[in-house]
Structures are given as structure tokens and as C-alpha cells.
């Protein structure tokens, strides 16, 4: 009888503790919005061309069911880049996320892991995409599943299985893409990352990404190298390059930023020039970011594109970028 009373008391205490935990957590959700606008003037062969652009509009909602389960859906409204359509809406994200102190799992149309660390370090998505995204080596979201595990304070590992076609073409074939990454923090404020992925469809497409970056309250510096073998499943066609970028916190609301990219390709068997020569080249960005108010950032910046193609003139641009975030 004594054992029964002890067990009953323990069960009552456990239920009471669980009830208190449940009472403390209140399921809730919140909408969010993000807008990328710009005005720019470009000069090529001394001829200016100017235009206003709405490059992105994100609308979404995030809901926390419990301390461990969260769902998020995002609509991405943007120029599809083809045809006569002005703007098209896509499901950018639509996923369920399970997370604990060490484990994080995504399922659905998820943020991909190929360049998320690099994109966060760059920090100016509204000005320009990060290297892999800008040159179409990988997509920022796709239908699939990812898992990240915090092995130690300085080490995390992640795996992802995805369709490999991005969120604009969710499942046009049965080919999957599998990736693996390791993120290290060997010393405080220093981050290094290794990532690779593979996909097979007649030929084998594979990607390699190396990154290292340092960031503190005053400045940040980062470098990355990316290579994709058999780009878009084109046998023998490789695309690769480097990106260097940094920021300097001039005042509480003013940052200086700079970036340099170099995109290169190889010669495919039987050809005399690099297969992507018309799009290869070097990108230069230098500018200032002003935090006007919470959720509003404005950046005047200068850009230059030096094409690798012979005879192409240097193209320079003046941009005024605006981000509105709710």
C-alpha cells in the first residue's frame, strides 16, 4: 500500500507539472511581410538606362502549435523572368518544423541548406542575392526534408533530401538531390562551413561549397568558394567561383558594405571557349546601408559587372535599394 501511495503521489505531481507547462505555453501565430524595391541607373557604352523595380514581395504567416512544433507558409510574388507575365505568385515556403535544443527538422517546401549560412552572413538579400542564388547553382527553397543536429557547442551537422528543382518547379521528375553539411565555430565569432550534394539524371550533378566568416559588433568579413560539376546535368559543364564580402558598422544606424564575385566556367570537350563565357565575369558592389526605422532599411550603392566575354564593355550601375520588413 505504501508503494501504491508513493506511485500515486508521483503521478499526481507529474500531471501537475505537465499541466503547469501546458498552461505556460500559449499557441500563437503572427503574419509577416517583406518588400524589396529599388531604383537604378545602369551605364553601358556611355548609354544610361533607368527603371524602378519591385523585385520581391513576401507575404506569410507563422504559427507555433507547441514549444516544439511550428508551421510557416510564405507566398513569394516576383518577376518570373520569362514570358510576358509581369509578376507571378509562388509558394516559397510551406513547412512543418520540429525543434529542440539540439535537433531541428523541416518537412514540406523548406528553406534549403546549401547557402543559408552564407546568405545570413552577407545579410543584404534585398540588395543582391548571395553567390549560389545569384548564379543559379542552387535554389533558396525546395520541396523536401532536412535535419540539423547540434553535436556540440562548436559543431552542427545537417542533411537534406529535396526535389532539386527549386520552389517554382516542385516535382517535374523523379530525380532527387541529397546534401550534407557541417558547420563549425572553432573560436568565438568565427564560422566555417563545408557542404556537398549529389543528384543523378543520366549524368551526375554534384556541388561543393566552402565558407569561412568572422563577425563581431563592429565588422564582418567572409569568403566562399562554390563549384558545381555537370551544371544542370550538362555532361562536362562545370560552373565555379569565389565571393568575398564584408561590412563595417560606422554608427548605430549606418553600415558600410562591399562585395566581390568572380564567376567562371570550363571548356566542354570539343569546344574552344568556356561554355558559360557570355555570363561569366566579375561583380563589384560598394555601398552604405541606413536603418531608417525598425523594419526599414535603405541603401545607395554602386555596382560594376566586368564580363569575361571578349569585346563586352564594363557595365556600371547606381542603385537605391529599399527593404520594408514587418
Image: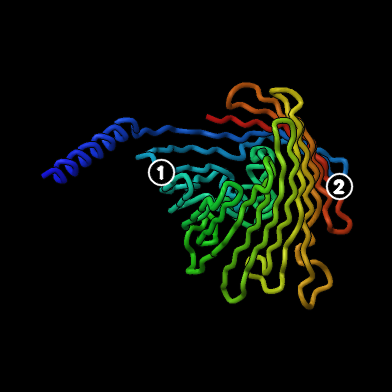
Q: Report helix, strand or loop for mark 1.
A: strand
Q: Residue furthest left?
A: 1
Q: Residues within 10 Å of mark 1 (few under 14, many from 20)?
A: some
If you read the primary sequence from the N terminus, does the residue marked by circle 1 or circle 2 appear first? 1
Q: Where is 198 relative to 278, above or below?
A: below
Residue tagged by mark 2? 314
Q: Residue furthest front?
A: 2
- Residue at 51% x, 53% y: name it: 148
Give percent across and percent down for residue 63.
39, 38
- Residue at 57% x, 68% y: name it: 199
Residue tagged by mark 1? 71
Give percent across and percent down for residue 319.
74, 34
Judge by depth and name the residue closer to the eye, 291 or 225.
Answer: 225
Residue 42 can be seen, yes or no: no
Mark pair 1, 2: CA separation? 46 Å
Judge by depth and name the residue closer to the eye, 221 or 116.
Answer: 221
Q: Where is 49 relative to 211, above or below?
A: above
Q: Residues within 10 Å of mark 2 (few under 14, many from 20)?
A: some
Amino acid at each position: 500500500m505504501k508503494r501504491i501511495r508513493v506511485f500515486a503521489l508521483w503521478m499526481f505531481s507529474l500531471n501537475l507539472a505537465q499541466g503547469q507547462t501546458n498552461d505556460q505555453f500559449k499557441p500563437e501565430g503572427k503574419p509577416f511581410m517583406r518588400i524589396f524595391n529599388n531604383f537604378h541607373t545602369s551605364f553601358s557604352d556611355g548609354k544610361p538606362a533607368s527603371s524602378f523595380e519591385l523585385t520581391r514581395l513576401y507575404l506569410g504567416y507563422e504559427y507555433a502549435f507547441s514549444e516544439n512544433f511550428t508551421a510557416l507558409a510564405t507566398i513569394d510574388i516576383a518577376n518570373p523572368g520569362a514570358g510576358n507575365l509581369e509578376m507571378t505568385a509562388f509558394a516559397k515556403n510551406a513547412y512543418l518544423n520540429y525543434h529542440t535544443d539540439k535537433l531541428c527538422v523541416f518537412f514540406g517546401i523548406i528553406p534549403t541548406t546549401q547557402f543559408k549560412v552564407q546568405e545570413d552572413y552577407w545579410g543584404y538579400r534585398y540588395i543582391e542575392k548571395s553567390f549560389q542564388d545569384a548564379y543559379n547553382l542552387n535554389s533558396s527553397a525546395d520541396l523536401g526534408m532536412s535535419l540539423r543536429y547540434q553535436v556540440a557547442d562548436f559543431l552542427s551537422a545537417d542533411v537534406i533530401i529535396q526535389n532539386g528543382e527549386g520552389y517554382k518547379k516542385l516535382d517535374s521528375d523523379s530525380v532527387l538531390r541529397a546534401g550534407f553539411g557541417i558547420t563549425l565555430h572553432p573560436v568565438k565569432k568565427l564560422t566555417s562551413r563545408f557542404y556537398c550534394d549529389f543528384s543523378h539524371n543520366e549524368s551526375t550533378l554534384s556541388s561543393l561549397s566552402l565558407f569561412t566568416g568572422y563577425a563581431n559588433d563592429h565588422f564582418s568579413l567572409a569568403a566562399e568558394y562554390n563549384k558545381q560539376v555537370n551544371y544542370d546535368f550538362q555532361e562536362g559543364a562545370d560552373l565555379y567561383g569565389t565571393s568575398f564580402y564584408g561590412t563595417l558598422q560606422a554608427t548605430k544606424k549606418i553600415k558600410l558594405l562591399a562585395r566581390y564575385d568572380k564567376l567562371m566556367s570550363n571548356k566542354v570537350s570539343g569546344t574552344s571557349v568556356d561554355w558559360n563565357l557570355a555570363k561569366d565575369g566579375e561583380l563589384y558592389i560598394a555601398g552604405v546601408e541606413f536603418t531608417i526605422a525598425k523594419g526599414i532599411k535603405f541603401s545607395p550603392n554602386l555596382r560594376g559587372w566586368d564580363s569575361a566575354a571578349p569585346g563586352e564593355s564594363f557595365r556600371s550601375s547606381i542603385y537605391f535599394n529599399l527593404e520594408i520588413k514587418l
